Image (cartoon, rainbow, N blue to C red):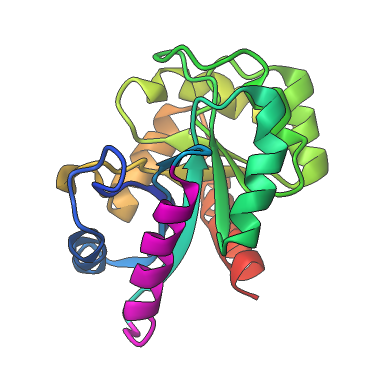
Amino acid sequence: MIIDLHTHTFASDGVLLPSELIRRAIAAGYRAIGITDHGDETNLEDLLQRAIKAAQVWAENADIVVIPGVEITHVPPDRIPALAARARELGAKVVVVHGETVTEPVAPGTNAAAVRCPDVDILAHPGLLSMEDAGAAAQNNVYLEITARKGHSAANGRVASVAAKAGASLLFGTDTHSPGDLATVDHARKILLAAGVAEDSIDEVFTNAEKLLNRITS
């Protein structure tokens, strides 16, 4: 079953209500879903109130675990630690940072700041990831995302290769914005294989999601 800790609602740039996103994830066979809308200092409180409310409403539904969180997005790197810490204070269970994807003008140094921040769980679509930053991710238990998102996925091969050399842990994430973005296990496996993840390592990627889910819900 899919554990996907990187999705969006119309609280940022997604197109679905939290309830519809969650219901569609249940129908797709998801075990857990993270609601991680794009956030900065201007909207963090509102986003987390919405995500926490969604998690509370669905808490009695045994079919899925809903994780409230945020994706810190296009924030100057030196502000990432304080914003991630504030997200934790406000109740974020998962903190994602929008990495230096090759398709957007993310500030240089974002990857470096994210993987060295104790309050960050996932560096999403990190683009032209450096060996140094992958090593820091391994040391600080920050997961690196292999993404299903069109455009962002252009660097999946590099991320998988550098992560393997540095001993960093990978996660699969859809970065869902619309209904068709949710993935099946078979689709996730194909994306991981296309990224160059060894076939005998794919189960480890899914196990990493399980480990992170256990960490943030314990």
Closer to the camera in the image, 72 or 123: 72
Q: Position of residue 175 (x, y in %)?
A: 36, 40
| Furthest residue toward right | 139
Asked whether the viewer can see residue 169, the reply is no
Question: In the rendering, at what x and y percent does residue 42 appear?
Answer: 47, 39
Answer with left or right where residue 132 lies relative to residue 212. Answer: right
Residue lying furthest front: 42
Q: Quadrant of the C terminus?
A: bottom right
Residue 173 x, y percent position in the rendering:
43, 44
Q: Quadrant of residue 138?
A: top right
Rendered view: 76 above or below 167: above
Task: Indicate whether 85 appears above or below 162.
Answer: below
Q: Is residue 134 visible?
A: yes
Q: Is residue 56 magenta?
A: yes
Residue at left offset 59%, top offset 72%: 217
- Say which residue appears at 25% left-offset and 69% top-offset: 26
The residue segment tinted magenta is 43-62
Question: Is residue 77 or residue 141 the one in the foreground?
Answer: 77
Which is nearer the eye, 115 or 44?
44
Determine whether, in the image, residue 85 is placed left or right of residue 100.
Answer: right
For the N terminus, the image quarter is bottom left
Looking at the rendering, which quadrant does residue 133 occupy? top right
The quadrant in which residue 84 appears is: top right
Give residue 128's position: percent from left, percent from top.
Answer: 57, 14
